[in-house]
Image (cartoon, rainbow, N blue to C red):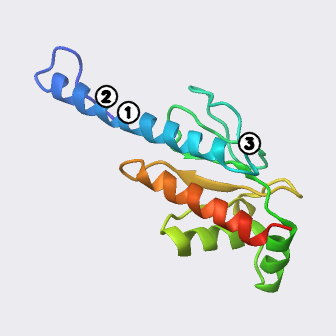
């Protein structure tokens, strides 16, 4: 907001309540998503760093910051999944993302579209969707994906 109400303005209490409620909701969803990723085999991201903003270009970790509304975890997927991705004409992270979308309706963006470091795989996801139940759909999909392509 370019010119928010100031303390003492008649609309300030409502503005502050709405602002705090939105921020709290985003924080709850971000925490739920972070915890879900930490449970997932082959998914790595560092502890959240609130208040520090970084570009995801050529990064190999997550950006979880005040003001940013995404996570960018590193993923490791089985060689069989990488082979299947090549057969499908896709990058491995793109293959994973499309499978996640088809299975859950949750859309994430492959890290290969962000210029990730060679030899690493990532995806970028936001935590804007309301609620947190969708994080369970991601963890369930991931377990099934890993089991399907496990050596």
Task: Measuring from the top left, give residue 97's x and y in whole percent.
Answer: 64, 67
User: In front: 86, or 4?
Assistant: 86
Residue under pointer 2: 20
Q: Residue furthest top?
A: 8
Instruction: Report the residue at 17% width, 28% height from top.
Output: 14
Q: Is residue 134 visible?
A: yes
| 104 lies left or right of 85 | left
User: Which residue in the protein does label 1 denote?
Assistant: 23
At 79% across and 61% down in the image, what residue appears? Answer: 77
Rendering coords of residue 142 (x, y %): 64, 60
Whole-percent x, y for residue 95 in the image: 70, 73
SS for tag 1?
helix
Q: Which residue is mark 3?
A: 61
Please tell me how crowded label 2 is: few (under 14), some (14-19), or many (20+) other residues with Cα within 10 Å: few
x, y percent for residue 36: 57, 45
The span from disc 3 to disc 1 (Cα, nearest Å) is 23 Å
Which of these two is toward me, 79 or 8?
79
């Amino acid at each position: 907001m370019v010119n928010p109400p100031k303390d003492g303005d008649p609309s300030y209490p409502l503005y502050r309540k709405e602002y705090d409620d939105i921020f709290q909701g985003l924080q709850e969803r971000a925490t739920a998503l972070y915890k879900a990723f930490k449970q997932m085999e082959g998914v790595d991201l560092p502890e959240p760093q609130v208040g520090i903003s970084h570009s995801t270009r050529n990064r190999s970790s997550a950006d979880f910051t005040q003001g940013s509304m995404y996570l960018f975890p590193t993923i490791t997927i089985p060689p069989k999944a990488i082979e299947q991705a090549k057969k499908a004409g896709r990058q491995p992270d793109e293959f994973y993302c499309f499978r996640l979308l088809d299975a859950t309706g949750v859309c994430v963006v492959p890290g290969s579209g962000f210029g990730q470091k060679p030899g690493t795989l990532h995806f970028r996801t936001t935590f804007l969707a309301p609620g947190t139940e969708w994080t369970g759909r991601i963890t369930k999909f991931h377990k099934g994906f890993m089991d399907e392509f496990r050596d």
